[in-house]
Image (cartoon, helix red, strand yellow):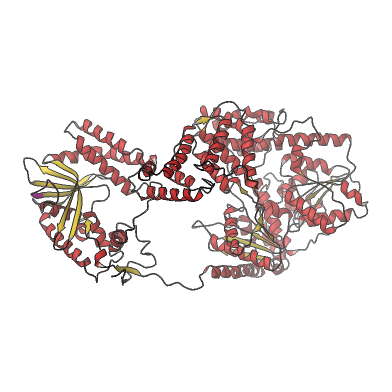
Amino acid sequence: MFTSQNNPRVFAVHPGCDFARVFVDGLIDRMKDANPEDMARVEIYLTTNSLRQAVIARFIEHKNTFLPKLYLLTDLKRDARFPAIPLPASTLRIRLELIQMIKKLLENDQRFDSHLAQYELARTLESLLQELNEENVGPEDLQGLDQTNLSSHWKESLKFLEIPTGYFKTSTKPSEEARLRLVIEMLVASWEINPPDHPIIVAGSTGSVGATQYFMQKVAILPQGALVLPCLDFDLPARVWEKMGSKSPQVDHPQYRLYELATKLNIFPTDIPHWTGNIVRDRPRNSLVSLALRPAPVTNQWQSEGPKLANLKEATEGLTLVEAPTPRIEAVTIALQLKKALEDNKTAALVTPDRSLIRRVKTTLGKWKINPGNSRNDNLLQTSLGNFLQSIANLMGREANPEEFVALLKHSHTNSGSGQERHREFASDLEFYIRSKGPEYDPMKQTGSWLNINPGQDETKWFKWFKSNLDQLERSTKGTLEEFVSLHKSIAASLANGPDGQSALLFDNEDQTTDKVNTLFNRIWRASSIPGKIPSLEYAELFYGLACEMQISNTSEVTPNLYFWNTEDARMQSPDLLIAGGMNEGSWPIFLGQDPWLNRNLRSQLGLNLPETKIGLMGHDFQQIVSGKEVILSRSTLGDGDPTTPSRWLSRLTNLLNGLDPDGISALESMRARGNQWLQLAERSEKPESRQSFYCRPEPSPPLVSRPKKISVTAVRTLITDPYAIYARDILKFKPVYRLKVEPSYLLRGIKLHTIMEQFMAVFNEDPDEVEIEKLMEIAKEALTNTGTLPVVEEVWLSTLTHNAKELLQIEQAIRQKTEPEFLEHKGEYHFDHLDFTLTAKCDRIDLEHESTNIWHLFDYKSGAIPTASQIDKWEKQIPLQVIMAEKGAFEGVSGTVSRAAYIGIGRKPEIRDVGNRNLAGIDSFMDDWNKFQELVKFYQSSTTGYISRRYGGAGTQSNDYDHLARFGEWEDTDKSIYQKVGDG
């Protein structure tokens, strides 16, 4: 097929072309004079499976031709032509052995705060070993590194890297990458003895991997060997190519890897011919993009060469720039563009590294029953079965928290046999019971008490079945891999089968997901020969990591001609419409992590790729995409509420056009105008068809017979500030449903501090300060342990109390100089006969003066801010009402006069603040509050009075539990209310 030549045989195709189409057409053209069967002898090595499928499809379109032998470069890893080379070791086994090595490192290394770092370190170490094998870097190269001026961290890392030498190519059980290098070396050696007489072509690779690049160099010098490079910039001048290899190589330039490969082949890039020999060198788009992406040191050429660009209007005619205000609008815009392409019978692809963008676009397209083919498959954890198994693994060796308990209980795979209906009924009832308790109750402690009020035989059997599985998981703190796999599968089967043990066929279904799960368990099982037991947390992390790697292809019906692609797919295929989505920094290019094992200097010494090289490869993908016939460049100007930065390559293109006045500016404005048309369409599609009238501020007026006849002194504030909350709670009987996770709320903290002070009062005995403080802290430690909230929050609360303990003790000692606690958490009530209404109260503390039988002091503990005089005057009526109740005998055992009423601050700032003192002022005025309260009750006993929402807005409203019911937000505190009779009122 090829004529004899002395130089390596290298061809290329131009940016923006359909690589598979151009390559196949060129190959058939070169073979037109050969016998038809000669095509079947041609060996072609390709980069991806999608490219192989595209090549096959193009051959089929030509009809009446033999297919050549099509291989992937990665197929060489398991090439069976060289039985002397051992098959590669299990990647899982290698990872497990690396974890064991890293464990020993962490035992004696304080650089890592947590041993949980071992999983991430093992992953990065495995990746580094792969790269070392690919680049043919051995242990001897590591030992020969110049360590002058190297910090101790990197010296320790190099010392550790000497350990895993068993995974280099000399191993009897090499890794896949090591075997790839060994196979290539042996294959090349056989060619030197007996050169193949048939064509061998490597197509579509840039040689970015060392082993692949070595293979390509050897193929290029075969008698009938050739390379076909993708996306070579034929518009780049020789002087720019020359500067790429200067003392500061431009490794982040899109064309750098091709330059490096050509240099190693002793070919200058401008001498590489086009594969088909008919490159259109004057295509305006390619010239524009080539100039925009020039290396940074030569961007001054924009000024000299920019004005020479011909026909900028034609160059940008197929380019559309979408700058959406939000990620949501960007996704809707892209979905509309794909839908329009489908209607026009075009092929179209969204290309983006941003998975969240793909999910949003997919959701939007789902409204129209459109499901594009997706080369970026979901992983096993994104399936229902994978999520179920990971939930079980996460509970090994520890008690489930409330969220995990309910999530597993209500999972679709739990009790998925014949008892599903009864199971859902019990699960919902148990969840509601847990949620109905206040924050002072640990939700997990409520699971057992549920059974006490549901003692039926079915409920008992059901609850014990579920709890026994969780208990079994909790006890499994350590074990071998084999033991964990057995337990994992048995618990999963038990939970799926339900209390009656009826098989749900969890691991026997004939579908892709079940097959992947069984494969995953078998992989772990085969690796279980590694000796020793591991903690359950390590098994859960291992299962998680492997499940993330298990890819699940889209099995639902796929809409033809529409695709979601990663950047690798876009290198080799060119649909009618290409949409580059999420064109912001962080996606184009993605952020690159730091190598924890080798710094830049060490990587450079070893000849390994620097991070900028990966940026250059992605820039190469961008150049291929943006050079297409019809391209949409899309980005969101906001991401998670913060402004985004446009991709560096997009910025270069727009900046160049902005500087080419007037044609460049006009071309850029046209690109934006085309994008704005789509944005307007997207924004219109997001608006509701008709504007819904906003809900008004409610003021319901229920019948008198349904209105409450009793209220607590603490709820009086709510009646004053937010009457609607009283209506919702006491008339409609709506009660808040608490979260499963106990939040570190002020309410929970206040409840616990009140409990601590109550218990401290019972043991206070005028002992020395140190003894009393010790008593207080012992009580606090017990009360602030296992509250259900985060341990770190408990520590903060305890730390604050420790800091305030001495001041709290001094306050208590000052109080006891005049009084002694007589009642704690003392309940009382007073009935107004003329109103037929009862006022209830629970006083935190009632003290009796020394040597007195009828002079009392009332105290109320406050863990938050103590009410101001203004707040007491307006709505904080708890203490004033309690004082009058006490003097009227509402509290059993209390009669006489209240001499003092005060708040005791037990929160961040301990203090005692009088509300009323007969020796000073205040208490005598409380009778006014008493009379005003009766007027308030009488006011709400009128059928013309409604319960307005948020009567006092802002700071006056203490609870927001019922704001959503009143639909606050659709109206404001300044809006007028709408009086409305409800029920029979």
Q: In this view, does 30 lie above or below 99?
A: below
Residue 514 appears in which quarter of the rendering?
A: top right
Q: Is residue 514 magenta-colored?
A: no
Q: Horizontal placement of 672 versus 574: left or right? A: left
Q: Horizontal placement of 78 versus 654: left or right? A: right
Q: Residue at x 79, y 31 (%)?
A: 83
Give whichever of 145, 901 is nearer the camera.
Answer: 901
Give whichever of 954, 398 is nearer the camera.
Answer: 398
Q: Which residue is drawn at 57% across and 37% down?
A: 489
Where are the magenta residues, as a range? 892-898
Residue 294 appears in which quarter of the rendering?
A: bottom right
Q: Where is residue 190 in the image (x, y as percent from the top left)?
A: 85, 34
Query: Can residue 2 be seen at all in this image of the molecule?
Result: no
Q: Residue pushed farthest front?
A: 457
Q: Position of residue 90 (x, y in %)?
A: 67, 34
What secondary structure prevails in the magenta region? Answer: loop
Query: Can residue 42 be seen at all in this image of the molecule?
Result: yes
Q: Where is residue 939 in the image (x, y as percent from the top left)?
A: 20, 67
